Amino acid sequence: MNGLQHTPGFEGSYLGAADRISPRAVMECKICWTPYDPAEGDDTRQILPGTAFTDLPDDWTCPGCTAPRAQFLVREDPGAAEAAILNAIDRRTAALVADFTEVFNARMRDLPMVNAALHVEAVAFQPWDGGALGVLVAPWFMNLILLPGPDRPVLATGEKEVIGFPSGDYEFLHNSREMTGPYLACSLFSPMGDFSSQLQAVDVARAVMAELFRHENRAETDRAAEIRAHAEAGLAEAGLAEAGGTEAGQAQTDGAGANGAEATAAGAEPSRRRLITGGLAE
Ligand code: FE
């Protein structure tokens, strides 16, 4: 969360860095101290209340001294903390997309399992538990991704962690990449052959994020977990569960192990995955 800390000496002067000003920022002219408050707008230019400083027309000038817009400084910004968090999430998801685009170009692009209609895209990432949660769409998989906050322990690559959401509990694998840093991934789809377009994949990714946070889904998930536990107990007796789980984990850890991810999804968590993916691509 280093990106969230204020840089000394920069706090009052956001010139040239409009993305650091939130829509709620109250600005003031550094020449005559006339304020611009988005809650009030500007009568002299028929600027409606609710207009953010960054949305003012380019030729807007100070109502007090006609100084150009660039002469304004931040007086107070009640939305600054939130804006900083969202900017930090943007930076982390950009690194994630860069990492997996590189994997695609280096190792995946010529494999038959790849869906050429798709590209790597971070979808619906939002603040969660001090970090960010969203869906990563790629030509060969769709995963829930947690970019962990500073308080979440970083486990070794391939370690499993069950994380609870309103709709139920989901198993994530810890992993790490050079640009992204540590992250956790929960497999949703792999391979991606059933998706006809990037737009369709993104729509499904958004729907997954919505379903994940719905309490109404929980009862069915718990029942699925119960059924799964029975099935796994049966497998363990047959001496198959552990071997299968290890293989799936290693393959998915590799980041290119779509078949391993599919084995995990199809073997250990079919009902749960179907729940948040609406049965698509089943
Ligand atoms: Fe002024």
Image: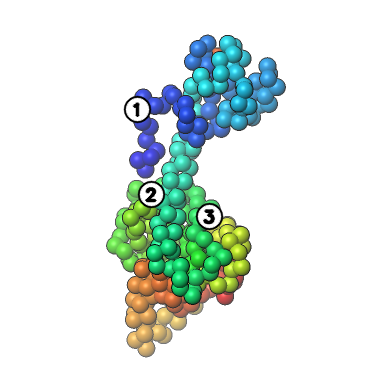
Q: Nearer the viewer, residue 257 or 210?
A: 257
Residue most extreme to the bottom? 238
Q: Is residue 156 left or right of residue 102?
A: left
The earlier-in-sequence mark between 1 and 2 is 1
Q: Is mark 1 within 8 Å of ligand 1?
A: no
Q: In the rendered structure, which amino acid carries the disc numbered 2?
A: Gly
Q: In the rendered structure, which amino acid carries the disc numbered 1?
A: Pro
Residue positioned 50% across, 70% down in the render:
114
Residue positioned 54% across, 63% down in the render:
118
Assess whether mark 2 and mark 1 are in contact (beta carbons under 8 angstroms). no
Quadrant (top left, top right, bottom left, bottom right) of the C terminus: bottom right
In the rendered image, residue 38, in percent from the top left (x then y), is placed at: 60, 26
Q: In the rendered structure, which amino acid carries the disc numbered 3?
A: Val
Q: Which residue corresponds to mark 1?
A: 8
What secondary structure is found at the residue carrying circle 1? loop
> Quarter of the image holding residue 60?
top right
Residue positioned 45% across, 38% down in the render:
84
Q: Nearer the viewer, residue 104 or 133?
A: 104
Q: CA distance from mark 1 to mark 2?
A: 24 Å
Q: Which residue corresponds to mark 2?
A: 149
What secondary structure is found at the residue carrying circle 2? loop
Q: Nearer the viewer, residue 138 or 148?
A: 138
Q: Which residue corresponds to mark 3?
A: 123
The earlier-in-sequence mark between 3 and 2 is 3
Tell me, for residue 58, which label it has, or none: none
Establish if 52 lies above or below 96: above
